[in-house]
Image: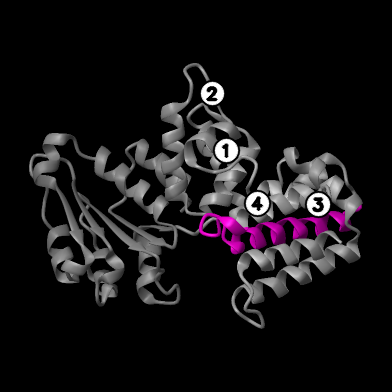
């Protein structure tokens, strides 16, 4: 089932007997678990009817015994198993999952891993339980996710601000939400917009020196600005690792290659085909004028070459020197 679907059912108090939440992205697993932990039982009922078990400290038999107890003076009991990926022979839970107790809500957090979909246990889970796969979002999808998450709270965010957050935090949704919560607390009274300036002032991301601005400088062939940003990065390598610059440039030039191949370059078709916000369309239009198809292919090849060099393959140069060299070759 999809995350939004499960969340909606939980908020409508429609519960399943077993929830098996697995996958690489812990944030969505945590939200679903906390929604169950905080809403199924009231505060007085939780004392006797809500149990949290940790995978490293338990086994399958203990979980089954707990799940088969009946609630005390409540409609349900809730059993939450955290770190379930550490449980040995977890597939033996099939003895309970095949015939779960209707008055127990068993929540299994199986983080950073997935059950083999070919296994009998997985097929039983699909048949008898609510199964959720929590996949990592690709970085190019995260800005849109940030926008949607904030819209649910009645807040807007500048496209540049969301890109800055992703450049700085990557696709770690938990970290991003923590930073967004901080920004919401300090949002000026009456304001419904998170700006790039607010991000810069309160999260420590430079509005002028970031991969977003480096991309813009390269696109516009602003050599002086690009060199200034690269110089800043080389002096602050810990906060500006080369891998972020490479991934951001690779993402952009890969999209630019697709842009060149589009016959219909209308606003609607480009944004849909490239999966980008209309806010970024002028940047791609300018880049297409400044970088012909042959040059774009060359840039993508350079990015792959310097990715290997940054990992120590055939070069002993520092990341700062490699980035300077790469940007020079891209722009000349």
In this view, the residue in front, 151 or 176, is 176
Q: Which residue is mark 3?
A: 223
Query: Image check: 285 left or right of 152?
Result: right
Q: Is residue 320 above or below residue 264?
A: below
Tell which tag, 4 or 3, sits nearer the viewer. 3
Marks 1 and 4 in Cβ contact (< 8 Å): no
Q: Residue at the location (51% across, 59% down)? A: 238
Q: Report x, y in % for residue 289.
A: 91, 50
Q: Which mark is residue 192?
A: 2
Spot occupied by residue 137 in the image (x, y as percentages of width and height): 54, 55
Q: Secondary structure at mark 1?
A: helix
* 251 is within the stretch colored magenta: yes
Which of the two marks, 1 or 4, is nearer to us in this view? 4
* Residue where numbered disc 4 is placed: 211
Gap in angstroms between the C-alphas marked 2 and 4: 26 Å
The image position of residue 282, as x and y in percent, is 82, 41
Among the two numbered marks 1 and 2 on one chain, the one whose residue lies closer to the N terminus = 1
**Mark toward the start of the polypeptide (3 vs 2):** 2
What is the CA distance from the residue labelled 1 to the residue labelled 4?
20 Å
Residue 105 or residue 290, whichever sits in front: 290
Q: Earlier in the sequence, mark 1 or mark 4?
A: 1
Numbered range of the magenta stretch: 234-263
């Amino acid at each position: 089932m999809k995350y939004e679907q499960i969340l909606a059912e939980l908020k409508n108090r429609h519960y399943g007997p077993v929830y098996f939440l697995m996958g690489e992205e812990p944030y969505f697993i945590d939200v679903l678990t906390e929604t169950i932990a905080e809403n199924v039982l009231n505060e007085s009922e939780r004392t006797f009817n809500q149990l949290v078990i940790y995978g490293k400290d338990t086994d399958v038999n203990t979980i089954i015994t707990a799940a088969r107890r009946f609630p005390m003076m409540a409609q349900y009991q809730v059993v939450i198993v955290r770190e379930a990926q550490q449980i040995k022979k977890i597939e033996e839970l099939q003895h309970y999952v095949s015939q779960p107790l209707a008055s127990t809500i068993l929540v299994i957090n199986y983080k950073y891993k997935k059950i083999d979909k070919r296994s009998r246990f997985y097929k039983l889970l699909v048949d008898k339980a609510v199964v959720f796969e929590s996949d990592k979002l690709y970085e190019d999808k995260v800005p849109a996710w940030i926008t949607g998450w904030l819209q649910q709270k009645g807040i807007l965010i500048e496209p540049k601000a969301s890109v800055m957050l992703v450049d700085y935090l990557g696709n770690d949704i938990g970290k991003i939400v923590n930073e967004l919560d901080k920004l919401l607390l300090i949002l000026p009274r009456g304001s419904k917009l998170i700006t790039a300036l607010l991000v810069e002032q309160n999260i420590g991301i430079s509005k002028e020196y970031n991969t977003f601005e480096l991309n813009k400088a390269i696109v516009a062939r602003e050599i002086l600005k690009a060199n200034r940003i690269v110089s800043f990065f080389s002096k602050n390598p810990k906060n500006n690792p080369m891998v972020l610059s490479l991934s951001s440039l690779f993402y952009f030039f890969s999209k630019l290659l697709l842009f060149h191949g589009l016959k219909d370059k209308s606003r609607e078709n480009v944004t849909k085909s490239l999966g980008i916000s209309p806010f970024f369309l002028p940047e791609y239009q300018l880049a297409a004028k400044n970088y012909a198809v042959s040059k774009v292919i060359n840039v993508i090849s350079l990015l792959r070459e310097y990715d290997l060099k940054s990992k120590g393959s055939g070069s002993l140069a520092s990341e700062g020197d490699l980035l300077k060299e790469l940007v020079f070759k891209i722009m000349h």
